[in-house]
Structures are given as C-alpha cells and as structure tokens.
Image (cartoon, rainbow, N blue to C red):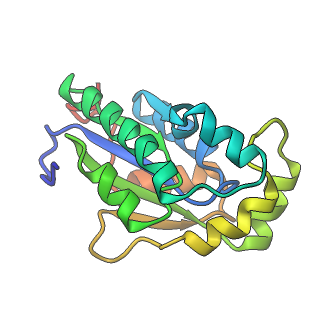
Amino acid sequence: MTTSTDAAVPTCVVVMGVSGAGKSTVARLLADRLGRPMAEADEFHPAANIEKMSAGTPLTDADRAPWLAAIRDWITAQATAGTSTVVTCSALKRAYRDVLREAGARVRFLFLNGAGDVIGDRMARRADHFMPPSLLRSQFDALEPLQSDEDGITVDVRETPELIVEHAAVRLDLSAADPATH
C-alpha cells in the first residue's frame, strides 16, 4: 500500500458512490481534464456478478472480493508503469476501499454523495445498464461514507459534473502537469 503524498508517486482517483450517482460521467470528465487513463469498475465484474445484479439480487462481500482485487491489480499495473489513473467503483464499504488502497499507488477517493430520491430518479432515466433501480436501497444500506482518516473528499451530486470535477481538482490538488500523470 502506497501512502506517500509525493507527487512522483502515481495516484489513482477512485470516483465512488452508489449506482446512479454519476460516477462514469464525473470520472470521464476528470480523466480527460487530467490526461489520465480511466477504468470502469463494471468492466471488471465477472459474468456471474452481472447476471446476479441483472436478476435483482444484491452482491455479497464474497461476490465482490475478486472484483475488487481485479481493480486493485489494474491500478497497481498502471502505477508500476508510472501512470496515474481514474477509476469508477462503488467502493461502498470501508473494507472495499481498504482493498483498493492495497494497490501500488496513492489511492484517493471522490465520493459522490446524494439523496436516494435524487439518485433513484437518475437511475430510472438511464437505459441499458444491468443494475436495476430495485437494488438502489441495498446499496444505500451497505454504504459507509468516507471517514475523516480516509484520503478523499465528498461532493454533492446535485452539483453539475463539471463543477464536481472542478471541486475535485482543487480540493484533491490534482494537476494535469503532475509528473506521475502520464
């Protein structure tokens, strides 16, 4: 686990929150702003997890373990190559974030926080996603917000994605000129 704040250490910003919070949109904007590669955590799920969620069944911690390990390993591979990254990941529980922090990079979190009705409305309007709105309650039930000793910030999802990215860049002191960015 890398905990250094040295700018030469590759950094991964994990854009986290419940499904429908806007992780993909914010992460894409942030990655573009910083010139970093981005990974969608959904792409690391094994088929069995996607089938389970598509059927309306919440994942267990055991279901999530190999998924989180795969994301952690991707972050480490990128950091080993000297590349800072942006990743989307619900990272709902501190234990999940602890797994991601085991990566060979400085892992920081951008928690997209919002009320259930706001996020539920967003989920109802999106198409072609395997996560049904019926599982939103289970995500809120599992959610453990960032704690004061975790490296990250919390932002309100009612802000525009552009403003969220601006807040993140300033409050996390992120720069495209970071020598470990590329």
Question: Which residue is pictured at 64% across the width and 63% down the height?
Answer: 157
Q: Nearer the viewer, residue 56 or 28?
A: 56
Question: Which residue is pictured at 37% across the width and 58% down the height?
Answer: 97
Q: Nearer the viewer, residue 159 or 3?
A: 3
Q: Is residue 37 left or right of 79 when viewed as pictured?
A: right
Numbered label tally: 0
Quadrant in which residue 108 is drawn: bottom left
Q: Is residue 152 above or below residue 177?
A: below
Q: Is residue 136 left or right of 103 when viewed as pictured?
A: right
Q: Quadrant of the C terminus?
A: top left
Question: Which residue is pictured at 33% across the width and 42% down the height?
Answer: 12
Quadrant in which residue 76 is drawn: top left
Can you give x and y, in whole percent of width and height, for residue 27 in the image?
Answer: 53, 42
Can you give x and y, in whole percent of width and height, for residue 107 in the image?
Answer: 29, 50
Can you give x and y, in whole percent of width and height, for residue 38 in the image?
Answer: 46, 31
Asked whether the viewer can see residue 95, the reply is yes
Q: Nearer the viewer, residue 19 or 12?
A: 19
Q: Is residue 133 above or below residue 14?
A: below
Q: Is residue 7 left or right of 138 when viewed as pictured?
A: left
Can you give x and y, in whole percent of width and height, for residue 42 in the image?
Answer: 58, 38
Question: Which residue is pictured at 39% across the width and 29% down the height?
Answer: 36
Asked whether the viewer can see residue 173, the reply is no
Q: Is residue 115 above or below residue 24?
A: below
